[in-house]
Each structure stands twice: as C-alpha cells, then as structure tokens.
Amino acid sequence: MRYQILGGLNVVSDDSRGNDEQLGEQMTEDVSLLGARKVQTVLAALLIRSNKVVSSDQLLPELWGDSPPRRATAGLHVYISQLRKYLATVQPGRSPLITRSPGYLIELGNDDLDLLVFRRLVREGRTWMRAGRHEEASASFWSALELIRGPILSDLDEGEIVGRFVAWAEEARRECVELLVECDFILGRHRELIGFLYDLVYEQPLREVFYHQLMLALYRSDRRADALRVYTTARETLTRELGLEPCRALRELHHAILVGDETRLAG
C-alpha cells in the first residue's frame, strides 16, 4: 500500500499505482471508504508514529481531547476494528495494523509512506548541496515538495500527535523551499523562480525570507522596480499585521537595490 499524509489522508492499494488517472480515482474512493473522521484520526496518528506503538492513553486524547466520554476505551476499540476492516478492503492479505501492549501500531513493511520519502529526499538534497552538486540537490528538493499535496491533515489536527506533526511538516516544507531556492539561485534560475516565489509570499505573507528571495530573483532578472515594490508590500504587511518593521536583512537588501550595490546583489 501507499500511505499519504502530506496533504489529505489517502491510502492507495498496490493495484492502483500504474495509471495516474486511476490513482486519483482510487484515492478518492479509499477516503470515502474510510468514513468516520475519528477513524481517520486514528490512522493518521498511527502513520505519523509508523512502526512504533502508540498507546491507548495517547490515542484517547487524540480523539476526544481532555474530555473523553465514559466509554472512550470501548469507542477506541470500535474505531480500531473499523480501521482494520478498511485496510483489509484496500489491500487484502497481511494486516499492517497490529495490537501490541499498551496500544497499536502500523507496521509498514514494504508499504510506502510519503512522509518517509519526503525526509529521505530532503536528506539527499542536503548531501548534494554539501558536495556542491546543486543540480542534483535542486531535483531532490523539488521531488520532496511535490509530495505535499495541499493543507496537511487539516481536518484532523486537533490532537497533540497530529497537531505537532502538522506544525513540524509546515516548517519542514518552508525549510525545503528555502534550500531549493538557494540551489536554484546558484544555478542562475532567477527568472524561473519568480512566479513560484510570488505564490509563496501570497501564501505566507509574514515569512520574510520569501520576500528577500523574491526581491533578489526580480533584481537579478532586471526587474529592479518590481523588487522595490515587493519591499513596500512586505513593510506594509508586517507593520499592519505585527506592528514590526522588516528584519535587518530585508532592509539591507532594499538599500542595496536602491543604491545598486552589486557586491551584495551579484548572483
């Protein structure tokens, strides 16, 4: 099976891997089969901690917060049973859901989990960067980012396990983007990055590093006026939302663009 948690929760059977159109249809079907939100929450928590036991005491607050019902443990058993049946419909045969004191675990075996692939690709990208192999590093970072299919587990993040994972994943995505842009700058791909960086600024308007990278990309693409306008937007946004001036790095970049300081702006 293929498990996907870097976006909406999806489970894809081995039989659906060959055709991209079929894959999309299969994912939609699998999610609908999974049904109840609490069953999805259990699966998400177990996948985040894949190959490790998640205790019942950890799963109960994931499902009900600080106010579990009187028969919460019995309810958890029901959800585990439903999840076990669901996984059997997706991939008959070996059950990856194992009961092991004091709780349960998903044993991946030969199954894929996009989270693990993402981590491996980012590690590989960093290794390529340290070796000065920026083409390979860029490809690894792009491949990692393509695994993130939208808001991460957005309807399931009320508990500690899923909530902390979502916060980590969002930060990991931002770091991956920053490393990717750094690589592509070294490779001289400034023009190719402009649209991508505009989207990032729109999505994350308080992340100053993306304004910084966008300004550099625009300046190095002979769009000095547009780079200065980005700074104005950044300053207005930060002042309005946080009551803060742009950080020192952003202010210094703005000044360098104004005076044409090529020692600071050269790519």
Image (tube, helix red, strand yellow):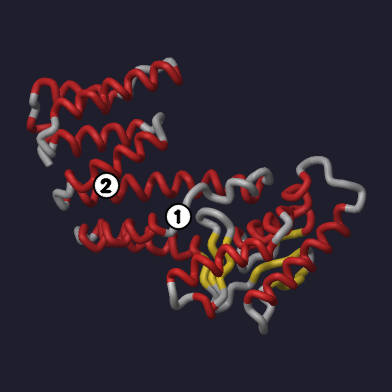
Q: Position of residue 57 (x, y in %)?
A: 78, 54
Residue carrying label 1: 148
Q: Earlier in the sequence, mark 2 or mark 1?
A: 1
Query: Residue at horizontal 65%, vertical 57%?
Result: 45
Residue carrying label 2: 181
Q: Dividing the picture into quarters, in which one does residue 238 lie?
A: top left
Q: Which label sits in the foreground, 2 or 1?
A: 1
Of residues 83 and 20, the one nearer the viewer is 20
Q: Where is 136 relative to 179, above or below?
A: below
Q: Where is 17 relative to 166, above or below?
A: below
Q: Where is 60 relative to 200, above or below?
A: below
Of residues 118 and 233, the one nearer the viewer is 233
| Element type at mark 2 | helix
Q: Which mark is residue 237?
A: none
Pointer 1: residues within 10 angstroms few (<14), some, or many (20+)?
Answer: many
- Three-letter code, disc 2: Val
Q: Dividing the picture into quarters, in which one does residue 134 lie?
A: bottom left
CA gap between label 2 and label 1 equals 17 Å
Residue 208 as seen in the image, left or right of residue 48: left
Query: Residue at horizontal 45%, vertical 19%?
Result: 242
Query: Residue at horizontal 45%, vertical 69%?
Result: 21
Residue 174 as seen in the image, left or right of residue 157: left
- Three-letter code, disc 1: Ile
Pointer 2: residues within 10 angstroms few (<14), some, or many (20+)?
Answer: many
